[in-house]
Image: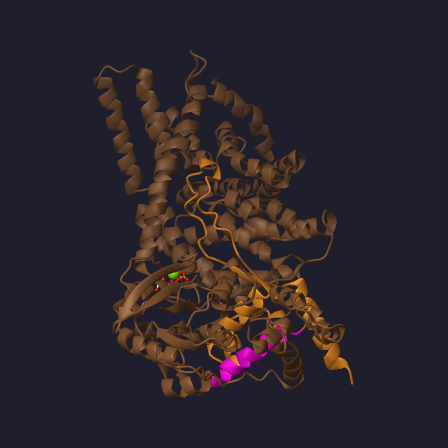
Amino acid sequence: MLKELLKAVRDGDYVSKSALAEQFARPVPFIEAGLAELVRMDYLQESENLQLCDLPCGKCPYTGFCSQTPFKTITVTEKGERLLRTLSYKETRP
Amino acid sequence: MYTIALVGNPNSGKTTLFNALTGSNQHVGNWPGVTVERKEGKFRFKDQFYKVVDLPGTYSLGAFSEDEIIARDFILKGDPDLVINVVDATNIERNLYLTTQLLEMGVKVIVALNMMDEAEQRKISFDLANLSVKLGAPIVPVVASRRKGIEQLLETAVSSIEKQLDYKVFISYGRELDGKIARIEKVLAQKEVGYPSHWLAIKLLEGDEYVLDLVSESDLSPRELELLSFSRQNGAYELELVDKRYEFINQITGSTVFRPQKPVQIKTDKIDKIVTHKYLGLPIFGLIMLGMFQLTFVLGEDLLGDSVADAIGIFGEYAEALLLNLNAPAWLGSFVANGVIGGVGAVVEFVPLIVILYMLMGVLEDSGYMARAAYVMDNVMRSLGLQGKTFIPMIVGFGCNVPGIMATRTLESKKDRMIAILINPFMSCGAKLPIYLVFIAAFFPNNGGLVLFLVYSLGILIALLMGKIFGETLFPGEVSHFIMELPPYRKPTLRNVVRNMWDNVSGFLTRAGTTIFAVVSSLWVLAVLPGGVQPYGPESFLGRIGLLIAPIFRPAGFGNWQAAVGLFSGIAAKEAVVATLGMVYAGVEEGAELVAAIKAAFTPLTAASFMIMTLLYTPCAATIATIRKETRSNVWALFTALYTFLIGWVMAVLVYQVGSFLGFA
Ligand SMILES: Nc1nc2c(ncn2[C@@H]2O[C@H](COP(=O)(O)OP(=O)(O)OP(=O)(O)O)[C@@H](O)[C@H]2O)c(=O)[nH]1
Ligand SMILES: [Mg+2]
């Protein structure tokens, strides 16, 4: 399932855990666990935006009015891409 | 004395259980990674003493991290008589991954299914008898934090320690891998490696360095080494093995763990289908922003210009009168009334409205919509050949460009990063808001929301356009790819919103008090010197500076020296623009209100071109300094300062000239 998950992440426009859960017919925590495992094994890389709201901001009084939304982005790593390439190679072989 | 090890995922409640068992008081925290080394304790049960060891939390027993190694080492070398695997019942699928590894290591395991109270609250239920059989280990439900189920856990622990190990469940890794495992196992079984050979075989296939070294040290014949050699294709089977373990967990939990199908998730998906729609997404984003700006004015209408401004005006007169009564020198009275109260007051006047706008933005952020907005913009940007992730620093830039530019650090490619830095100043930062608000109050009081929306949209549009131009000229190259995670929607909590608002307002007032005061004070000196000339007049130093720059802006329609001085001070700090205007206008005509003065000095058309100039022209000094620091280049900093000025000027002139031509002047 992890391979399929990796593929779904690469092919999808965005990652919605609940949409993936529906796609794979598994509960959301299961998808979360799978993604976490892919990150741990370095097939995916997760990054959150830096928490910048505490920066002095040149003493600007508007520092506090700062975006608090944590954006999480996921990229398929080099290792992940390599795996996906071998997979698609296997698939296209007669 | 028997030894019991507590093993589990981070934050699963191991230390809480440890404390419940031993009566000690180790540090417990609601975040992972609290326990970083092992802690030992003792307890007595039925006249027997037991040693318990609390291990750091880990998700797996590979050799990926320090924690994993500490836990694994203890299980392998510390020779515990029993492992209590603490499992977070609310996240059982993920936690069981570790359980399967423990079982494969051939140690005695019982599962303490913790956080049952939370699971109950979330309406997750279990068929524990069935799950226990399928997993091949006893399972005891507990609530460690309330010491519930501890007695039962201990009973099970004690009886397990005395019983023979009877783990019979084997995970099948598929024909090919099972065969390989069996072959390696056979070789290793004859060696004295000291660990269960089934586990070693699996680890070898995973490409586990530690196990590889361990096995290489034992005397293997060349033929045996040959047999093991395929495992040297470092990690070739790793994913396959992990995958099968998950498959196994899925199989056993499928019929034994019951979760309510969360209606929230279904709703989230339905909403997402619409708000992230290929064609509808962008208009919806626009409508939401427009709605937010409109709502700001609906809620804050009465506050705009009127009551707060009156109060400040009265306060100013009162302060000046008081100072005169106290025989203070006249210049001090003028400084306080015109400089401080006219200047700083002009900004403070708009604080309520700004607070409302940012509160609404906070609600949008809290709800999870902003992530969708970024996704929608990502699509737009990708279609322009830009890195979509750039929109994240842009959103940050709406607050302040300095952190916006710093946020570009998350962009991996140099090209994406440079473009993101260069276009960030077009994101209208919070400090520019009071400027727009003054002009809206003067000329567009009934269409405030729409005007703000247009200003912000123009900023985004110019940013995208410049991004595209830079992408094709200065930094050609590949656009890198990323995917964004859309979190579920949440109901914004009033507490969060109010707390953020309070933080923002108090922070704003203290900082505004200092920066604006400093800028205004120095400009005040320029406005009243040299002695003998009319203070705040065109003859003062400030007036002369203004007159020097003003001609540049004549084609844009606002060639008066006050406007020029305002823009000039904005290069130091954008929040000083309104304060400066407030001071120069308040000084000319005693007690004149800024909005009224603006009405006299501008027309709706010149107001529009001035607002556009403010939106686009050279960012504040702090932003330029940040650009210099982040690009490590004076050239790029200077370039940004100049090209933004040029774009602002061209757009302002364009608006004024076209507007005049069409008869709006
Ligand atoms: N609701 C509930 N909360 C619990 C329970 N057991 C522990 N907690 C809470 O869960 C959090 C984590 O507990 P810890 O005991 O620090 O977890 P840990 O496994 O030692 O965490 P690390 O040392 O970081 O690996 C704390 O806030 C505990 O109060 C439980 O049965 N029910
Ligand atoms: Mg702990």
Residue sitting farthest toward the top: B532
Q: Where is the N terminus of chain A found, in terms of image quarters?
A: bottom right
How far across and how far down the image is residue B561, in percent? 51, 27
Q: Where is the C terminus of chain A found, in terms of image quarters?
A: bottom right
Range covered by the magenta-colored residues = B237-252
Residue sitting farthest toward the right: A94
Left or right, B470 with respect to B333, comes to right
How far across and how far down the image is residue A63, in percent? 44, 43
Instruction: Mark yes or no: residue B595 visible.
Output: yes
Q: Please check the rendered image and state whether residue B249 is part of the magenta-colored stretch, yes or no.
A: yes
In the image, B272 versus B309, the foreground residue is: B272
Q: Residue at x 50, y 32 (%)?
A: B572
**A69, above or below A88, in the image:** above
- Letter of the orange chain: A
Colour treatment of the image:
by chain
Q: Main secondary structure of the magenta part?
A: helix
Q: Residue at x 37, y 53 (%)?
A: B359
Q: Residue at x 42, y 50 (%)?
A: B448
Q: Quadrant of residue B144?
A: bottom left
- Letter of the brown chain: B
